[in-house]
Image (cartoon, rainbow, N blue to C red):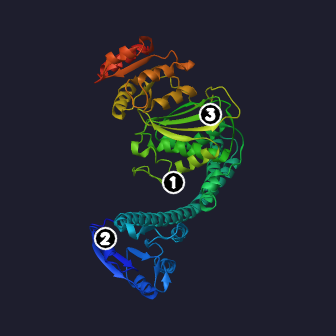
Amino acid sequence: MLLSDKTLRVLSLEDSALLTEQLAKLKSKLVFKHIRTLSELSRELKNHSWNLVISPFHMGGFSAFEALDVVRTHCPDLPFVLLSDGLGEEVVADMMKAGVEDVVMKSRIERLNHIVKRVLREHEIKDKEAKAHKIANEAFAAKEQMLAIVSHDIKNPLSAIHLEAQMLQRAAERAGKSLLAEEVKIQSARILKTTDRLKNLISDLLDKNKSENGLAHLTKGNTDCSRLLQEVLDSMRPLIQDKEISLRITVAAEAQMMIDRNKMFQVFSNLINNAIKFTPVGGYISIGLDESENEFVFNIDDSGPGLQDKEINKVFEKYWTGNSTDCAGTGLGLFICKTIVEAHGGHIYVENLPEGARFKFTIPKTVGADITALPYLENKMDLRKKIFIVDDDEDLREVISWALGKEGYAIHSFASPVEALKVLNKGRHQPNLIVVDFHMDEMKGSDFVLRKNEILQVKNCPVVMISASPQEVENEVPSELYKEIITKPIDLEGLVDNVRKFLV
């Protein structure tokens, strides 16, 4: 409550000139009313709106405890401040437990204004939180009702599609062994399988107990991940072909995982469908699997517009749909992915690429497999040279990423040198070159390079240092730790030329 903007309405059970004198010092229009009895207090609370109640502990005929009971009965959230003339600690503690916001000693009445301001400010925050919570609950209830209605209305046409597919399949079986009949059998079987999955998903959506808790309930089994992925791609083949999207896939041929097969189908389906939505006609989608000692790491890249920085931390929130009107959905797909992946003990995250976005998720490793290309999927392994860019200046990092990405290099950029070192330690991505800023708040570029050299896999990876003071780099950093110094302000053409000579 901004006291300078509003009238301060105070009910007081003590008539004190000193009290009104203190309150008058507040930059606010003051309405002050002295109450003598509990019945008068009750009547005022029923008939008028008040901002604050001030009460001494002892009054003629009743106590502050009784006054507080009346206030809480009529106005549960109305602030109540107690005036004390030397109460014991136990009594004060009991009053605070009962719901008194604060206690002011009469001998220090000058503190009253400070306490009033704080109490009213806290009350305003609680009031706003309560209103926001109510709005959120109403919105959630409306969303749930909408989803239930939509899901229910989908069931009828879905049943019709399922029935028609069954009739097609029976007709094909009666038609004999012709090529057309065999093709109809295959396509109708796919339609039946897809409608079965849709019916299961709708049932989950309509079941109130299968929200977060239902998604997190897993029925695990040893699963061939490559075959599971093939089923997902088969179900989406018409969408992929319609947009003339090329697939670039590198997945373990026999990646055996202990997972809930049906729920992991949802994860792949949602992520790939999301990539299809945002990939332009003629674009590409890359699906890959890396493995470390303890986990599998899936990545799904698209060549779409990518995400705005402010969206990165919101995409997995329930019902979040972003600002796009062309590809907006229910806002549940990525939330479902996050819930399922985390239920498996993994993690899911997203990052922007020079072109498009990359969704990654991890699954704890059970049975290992060598990474080889799937024999029945198109394989265009990403053979681009990898460059790590480590710079806490966001604008500079983006410009460098754009300039080098445009040259065809695979860019991995990091605002935090500590995060970059964590990735290098995990061994998921082995860069061919590291470009690092010498001056960073979290860690100097020289310290970063020294720690990088402790990691055997990247000890010999060349480093290009960026600095506004090249002489400082030469004085502080041994020359064997870097290959080149790029001076700020950076000449992008010169940067590209310098980088190119280390990536031949």
x and y, in percent, of residue 405 in the image? 40, 27
The residue at which mark 1 appears reads as: 318
Q: Secondary structure at mark 1?
A: loop
Residue type (three-letter) at the residue carrying disc 2: Gln
The residue at which mark 2 appears reads as: 22
The residue at which mark 3 appears reads as: 296
Q: Quadrant of residue 155?
A: bottom right
Examine the rendered structure and indicate whether residue 293 appears above or below residue 264: above
Contact (Cβ within 8 Å) of mark 1 with mark 3: no
Q: Is residue 419 left or right of residue 166?
A: left
Q: Residues within 10 Å of mark 3 (few under 14, many from 20)?
A: many
Question: Residue at point 64% right, 30% down?
Answer: 252
Instruction: State whether residue 252 appears in this view.
Output: yes
Q: Residues within 10 Å of mark 1 (few under 14, many from 20)?
A: some
Q: Secondary structure at mark 3?
A: strand
Residue type (three-letter) at the residue carrying disc 1: Lys
Residue type (three-letter) at the residue carrying disc 3: Phe
Frontmost of labels 1 and 2 is 2
In the picture, the quarter occupied by the N terminus is bottom left
Instruction: State whether residue 187 appears in this view.
Output: no
Q: Is residue 135 left or right of residue 182?
A: left
How far apart are the alpha carbons under marks 1 and 3? 26 Å
How far apart are the alpha carbons under marks 3 and 2? 67 Å
x and y, in percent, of residue 35 in the image? 39, 84
Q: Which label's residue is closer to the chain start, 1 or 3?
A: 3
Q: Which label's residue is closer to the chain start, 1 or 2?
A: 2
How far apart are the alpha carbons under marks 1 and 2? 49 Å
State the residue lying farthest toward the top.
480
Question: Residue at point 39% right, 18% down?
Answer: 499
